[in-house]
Amino acid sequence: MTEQLQGGRVRGISIVKAVVIGNTSTYLGGKRETDGHTHTWTVYLKPFKSEDMSLYVKKVHFKLHDSYSQPMRIISRPPYKVSESGWGEFEIMVKVFFQDPAEKPVTFYHLLKLFPNETVTVKDKTLISEQYDEIIFTEPTSIMYPLLVNARPMDINLSTHNNNFEEVERKTFTSIIEARTENKTEIAT
């Protein structure tokens, strides 16, 4: 049997929770006179599937650039997001803490995007930068296990994604197959 409790952990079990980390930003039309900011933006962590993460997530820390008056933002309930304004792009640390403190926090890094490039989407003058990731609970604690497997559904609007991740997956898979074929051809010649 795989669900054996040893040392407070459920042995032989791995549970994957898919998440989306991203940001949206909107150009203000120029520099604001009060602070020189050019964009409003929101950074977020949300479930890939429509489930209530608060059942197993205790809080999320968003570490902004040190130039912000309060660079550490702590969000204790969904939606896990921070909205601000600014003028430059920077890396944001997103640290997820779980309901059972015996589960180590997981840290993600997201590059706040304000300006269009090939890695972002623009819809209705709003720039969108999202990435898919996974939190893998290998042998979760006996406290976390039921929280992970019994996650409740949540409002579908809170887990709507701006990127079509199925299309991203299909394109990535196609490019991997093409690269493998090209490599085999090069090796054969």
Image (cartoon, rainbow, N blue to C red):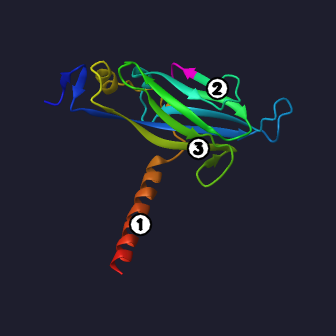
| Numbered tag placed on residue 179 in the rendering | 1
Residue 134 place in picture, x, y as percent: 41, 38
Check disc 3 and give the amino acid type: Ser
Query: How far apart are labels 2 and 1 at the CA level?
Result: 42 Å
First in sequence: mark 3 or mark 1? Answer: 3
Does residue 42 show up? yes
Query: How far apart are labels 3 and 1 at the CA level?
Result: 26 Å
The residue positioned 82% from the left and 41% from the top of the image is 30
In the foreground, 122 or 148: 148
Q: Does 183 sit above or below residue 87?
A: below
Q: Is residue 44 left or right of residue 150?
A: right
The image quadrant that residue 66 belongs to is: top right
Check disc 2 and give the amino acid type: Pro
Q: Residues within 10 Å of mark 1 (few under 14, many from 20)?
A: few
Q: Secondary structure at mark 1?
A: helix
Q: Is residue 25 left or right of residue 79?
A: right
Instruction: Read off the residue under disc 2.
Output: 71
User: For the C terminus, which image quadrant?
Assistant: bottom left
Q: Tell us which disc is closer to us: 2 or 3.
A: 2
Check disc 1 and give the amino acid type: Ala
The residue positioned 83% from the left and 34% from the top of the image is 32
Residue found at the very far left of the displayed protein: 1
| Numbered tag placed on residue 129 in the rendering | 3
Residue found at the very far bottom of the displayed protein: 189
Q: Secondary structure at mark 2?
A: loop
Q: Does 97 sit above or below residue 134?
A: above
Q: Which residues are magenta?
A: 74-79
User: For the N terminus, which image quadrant?
Assistant: top left
The residue positioned 69% from the left and 47% from the top of the image is 115
